[in-house]
Image (tube, rainbow, N blue to C red):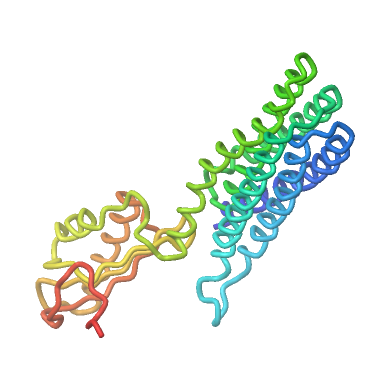
């Protein structure tokens, strides 16, 4: 558990540093975008500003998620991270849609862009974004909250590269339509990356079966253990993207004493953790007392 807190603390510090860096980038690009008349630079600035708040929200969520369990919050505040990731994904999609509309307007009515100013500011933005991405890269696969923030910053980095290429073409060939085109291409890339985070967070909040977990296989594996006759009324869900909870009814093959089930419980926990990555298990033991033996059961339909 101490190791987990250490990971949270390290991620939190990196998120805070990334927030400050991103805010500086956003202010720099706003000024540069106004002077260069570049929609791509201004859109990147807006994107960076939104990402500054997104990363800051991820930082706050990281802190809140570490609060202790209470009688009213028996699972603690861990799902704050999931809510923050969902919020950040939705905000990013809204920003992308707005930029699409602005790009279409600019394609229909191209305006001159000062390519050299655009290029200078974009290079500064790229360097700062790269630093932020490198800071969060190692933690992005461990935590969906950090991953959502990481995707924001990765999008900024890709956007900066695209803006640099656009600025070079504008400076050399005065192809001003490249500016809004780059904005749209970056938007398509970000939509693709954000969709996976959005679907994962919604699935977790809806308590869907964790991705890759085959409940039929889990049932079959448990029923192979000595003493178990049947496994039914199975539920599995993610508390967070790292914690998988599982509960079921187990029909024993004999009328066991409670003390006799202790060793079976240990075997079940060890098996589910090592083979399926299930971190929390709740079992209800039975002996010929449950009429309905379906694997999935929610009671009588109204």
Q: Residue furthest front?
A: 108
Query: In x, y percent, where is residue 165?
Result: 70, 22
Q: Is residue 21 left or right of residue 279?
A: right
Q: Where's residue 227, x and y in %?
A: 13, 66
Q: Position of residue 135 (x, y in %)?
A: 68, 38
Considering depth in this image, is 293 or 23 the residue closer to the camera?
23
Q: Residue at x 54, y 51 (%)?
A: 144
How many marks do you count on the picture?
0
Whether residue 39 is situated above or below residue 74 in the rendered picture:
above
Of the pair 264 and 93, the residue shown nearer to us: 93
- Give the position of the C terminus as an image quadrant: bottom left
Instruction: Give 87 or 42, whichever is nearer the viewer.
Output: 42
Residue 69 is drawn in which quadrant?
A: bottom right
In the picture, measured across the screen, residue 136 lies left or right of residue 290, that is right
- The residue located at (69%, 41%) in the rendering is 105
Say above or below: 89 vs 164. below
Q: Nearer the viewer, residue 268 or 129?
A: 129
Q: Report which quarter residue 56 is drawn in.
A: bottom right
**Residue pushed farthest bottom?**
302
Left or right of 96 on screen, residue 261: left
Report the residue at 65% width, 45% height from top: 101
- Lateral position of residue 276 relative to residue 219, left or right: right
Which quarter of the image is occupied by the N terminus?
A: bottom right
Residue 289 in picture, x, y percent from top left: 14, 83
User: Please, is residue 171 above or below residue 185 in the view?
Assistant: above
């Amino acid at each position: 558990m101490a190791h987990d807190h250490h990971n949270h603390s390290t991620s939190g510090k990196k998120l805070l540093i990334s927030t400050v860096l991103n805010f500086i980038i956003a202010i720099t690009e706003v000024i540069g975008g106004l002077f260069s008349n570049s929609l791509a630079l201004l859109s990147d600035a807006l994107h960076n500003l939104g990402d500054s708040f997104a990363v800051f929200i991820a930082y706050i969520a990281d802190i809140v998620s570490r609060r202790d369990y209470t009688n009213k919050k028996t699972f603690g505040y861990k799902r704050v991270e999931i809510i923050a990731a969902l919020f950040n994904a939705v905000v990013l999609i809204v920003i992308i849609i707005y930029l699409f509309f602005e790009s279409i307007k600019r394609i229909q009515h191209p305006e001159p862009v000062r390519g050299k100013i655009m290029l200078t500011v974009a290079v500064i933005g790229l360097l700062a974004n790269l630093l932020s991405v490198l800071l969060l890269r190692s933690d992005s696969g461990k935590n969906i909250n950090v991953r959502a923030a990481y995707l924001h910053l990765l999008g900024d980095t890709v956007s900066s590269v695209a803006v640099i290429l656009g600025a070079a073409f504008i400076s050399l060939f005065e192809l001003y339509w490249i500016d809004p085109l780059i904005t749209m291409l970056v938007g398509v890339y970000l939509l693709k990356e954000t969709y996976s985070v959005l679907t994962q967070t919604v699935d977790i909040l809806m308590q869907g079966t964790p991705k890759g977990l085959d409940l039929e296989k889990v049932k079959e594996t448990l029923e192979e253990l000595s003493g178990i006759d049947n496994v039914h009324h199975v539920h599995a869900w993610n508390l967070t993207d790292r914690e998988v909870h599982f509960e079921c009814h187990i029909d024993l093959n004999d009328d066991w004493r409670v003390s006799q089930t202790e060793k079976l419980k240990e075997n079940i926990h060890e098996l589910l953790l090592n083979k399926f990555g299930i971190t929390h298990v709740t079992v209800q033991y039975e002996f010929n007392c449950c009429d309905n033996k379906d694997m999935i059961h929610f009671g009588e339909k109204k």
